[in-house]
Image (cartoon, rainbow, N blue to C red):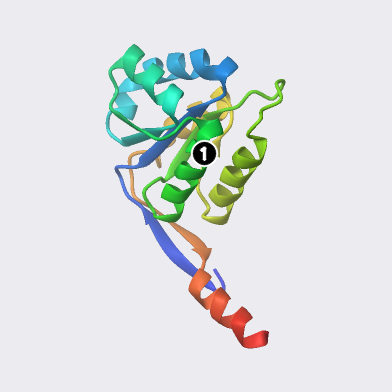
Amino acid sequence: MSDGYITFTIKEEKGIALIAHDNEKPKLIAWCRENQASLEKHRLYGTGTTARMITDATGLSIRAFNSGPLGGDQQIGAKIVEGQIDLVIFFSDPLTAQPHDPDVKALMRIAQVYDIPMAINKATADFMIQSALMDTQYDHEVIDFKKNVEDRAGTL
């Protein structure tokens, strides 16, 4: 890539965020059951209710944050910035208005800024979990934020 980018490395063991809107929680739980052997190889994170329901149904160990409407989506976004979460599986409900939609959009934006894979439905999650990259190291280019800030500060 061009100047102004740096290389980030996603390691073999990935930090995976598991999130679902209420109507989609049963689908995500079923997906986690189907992919339990793969998920067990990675560090799992989730928003409050979703994490608890997946753990209860599968026995997977998931670090739970707050519920999405109570800041959990923002906590997941912070962990992306800190380099702890490498991909996001978010079964969103496109047919129901969500009171915390701005938080969801902020999470999607931060995933895009940090070039983090994000599945918003089962089909995309299936492609991600079955990818040859899932259990290998992956280098990707991300904007060099420090240089970007320095350049902007120099022009103001």
Relative to 16, residue 106 above or below: below
The answer to whether one can see residue 3 in this image is no
Q: Quadrant of residue 48?
A: top left
Q: Amino acid at mark 1?
A: Asp
Residue furthest to the front in view is: 70
Judged left or right of residue 40, residue 133 is: right
Q: Residue 55's x, y, as percent?
A: 33, 20
What residue is drawn where x is 40% and y is 45%? 85
The answer to whether one can see residue 16 in this image is yes
Judged left or right of residue 115, residue 65 is: left
Q: Quadrant of residue 93?
A: top right
Callout 1 environment at 10 Å: few (<14), some (14 to 19), or many (20+)?
Answer: many
Give the camera-side residue of 1 and 23.
Answer: 23
Relative to 58, residue 13 above or below: below
Q: Residue 70's x, y, as percent?
A: 52, 34
What residue is drawn where x is 30% and y is 36%? 42
- Mark 1: which secondary structure? helix
Q: Quadrant of residue 17?
A: top left
Q: How many marks?
A: 1
Q: Residue 125's x, y, as percent?
A: 51, 29
What residue is drawn where x is 53% and y is 39%? 118
What residue is drawn where x is 63% and y is 34%? 100
Relative to 54, residue 86 above or below: below
Q: Residue 72's x, y, as percent?
A: 48, 37
Give the camera-side residue of 138 and 44.
Answer: 44
Say which residue label 1 marks.
73
Image quadrant occupied by the N terminus: bottom right
Image quadrant occupied by the C terminus: bottom right
Residue furthest to the bottom in view is: 154
Judged left or right of residue 25, residue 62 is: left
